[in-house]
Image: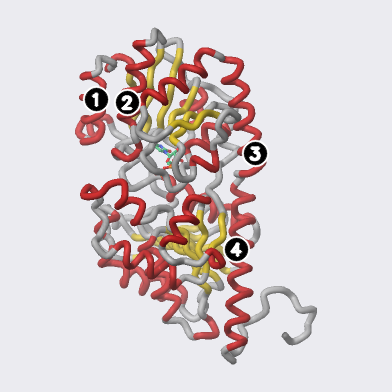
Amino acid sequence: MRISLVSEHASPLAALGGVDAGGQNVHVAELSRALAQRGHAVTVYTRRDDPGLPGRVRSAAGLDIVHVDAGPPRAVPKDQLLPFMPDFARGILADWGARPPEVVHGHFWMSGLACLDAAAQCPPTRRPVVVQTFHALGTVKRRHQGGEDTSPAERIRLETAVGRGADRIIATCSDEVFELTALGIPGTRVSIAPCGVDLDLFSPSGPAAPRGRTHRIVSVGRLVPRKGMDLVIRALRILADGGYDVELVLVGGPGNAARLEEDPEARRLKALAADLGVEDRVVFAGQVGREEMPPVLRSADAVVCAPWYEPFGIVPLEAMACGVPVVAAAVGGLVDTVVDGRTGRHVPPQDPGAIAGAVGEILDSPDWGAELGRNGYRRVRARYSWNRIAADTEKAYLLTLRSSRLTDEAQGLPLPRPLESTGGRAL
Ligand code: UDP
């Protein structure tokens, strides 16, 4: 198939850990690579956020990345990108020229708008099917962040329109399916394909970063309040009071140390650690590169993920792939990925006492911790390779193409070329 993946703010080439660069970047990079490896012709469209970027990059993985001119060619917070979506759609359409793909797959709601816009401008017989992965939903964000939510006012209305207008939605977890149903998107148009993990990069074998104390917990994420790093600092205080010689490594935030000093969330967290008297136990690692991440994860007795809510959450998969138990808030995708008592512990959201209790159990029983780690490793190998996720995504594409062909036929439109070989017979 010829497939366009559209990801307006999250480039597969970006460095990770900044406010707007995390799981979606990983997802688009790995999914596009795995689809290309499965023999598809894949192009990724993302917004040009640097004037020095070439228009088109051929990646080593055999796919193209196109930087579309839409808005100023510099970093712009994602919540300010909506006005540039018509230009973004125009750029995609121009690149398609006379040969649109068979499938255009939007990532995040604004990309979905651009996909629907570009597809609608193709001639009916060449119109690609539109598949959408939201990565995060405005309704959920508003519920948790209320007045702090900086999304454009139109987000929920437009996101719902994308959900209803796309030919198929790919949800990344079962919790998202419930949220989509609440938006009036019928389950018959929803497939599930979770995020995956790079099993070559993340594995139990390989070096572990050195520790400064007997025990270590690690928490990884963009430095935004909803990731709940403050809750983990509070849990650390409780563990220290319980007599554990334990440190906490917080990964994420800007790459350079001076910028980390100025980062408002890093400052808030440092002040909290100082207030609680645990500043000597917290290491702010800042942005950690992909290759450096496995040694950091391997150095932990447990990786803690304490978000208020989590559309999917790739970090637990990365920890499990490294054979490390995960203590996770039982929210969103973490309900599907972490199995309580088998690969880690589920704790209620926003509950430092429960986090400390679960980590303490693991620190008290290293053999049990090792067993949780082994089970996690087996679970991700069985279910979360990117090749498997790409195969699930491919199935969703084929299903969508088949039902769109049936609709076209019913409407008397000439059929596009057949999906599968017909052995020379006309369809
Ligand atoms: N990440 C990274 N370096 C950092 C911080 C994060 O490589 O300094 C990666 C992390 O390993 C994971 C992704 O960014 O692959 C975060 O994805 P997740 O789904 O957990 O959270 P999101 O950012 O989508 O909210």
Residue type of the residue flagged with mark 2: Phe
382 left or right of 289 in image = right
Residue corresponding to mark 3: 381
Could you tell which of marks 3 and 2 lies nearer the N-terminus? Answer: 2
Q: Position of residue 167 (x, y in %)?
A: 51, 71
Mark sitting earlier along the chain (1/4): 1
Name the residue that disc number 1 marks: 270
- Choose top left, top right, bottom left or bottom right for residue 412: bottom right
- Tell me, yes or no, whether the two marked residues, 2 and 1, touch with CB atoms within 8 Å: yes
1 and 3 marks in contact (CB < 8 Å): no
Q: Which mark is residue 396?
A: 4
**Element type at mark 2:** strand
**In front: 400, or 241?**
241
Residue at image location 54% in from the left, 59% down from the top: 63
Q: Residue at x 41, y 21 (%)?
A: 356
Q: Residue at x 47, y 27 (%)?
A: 303
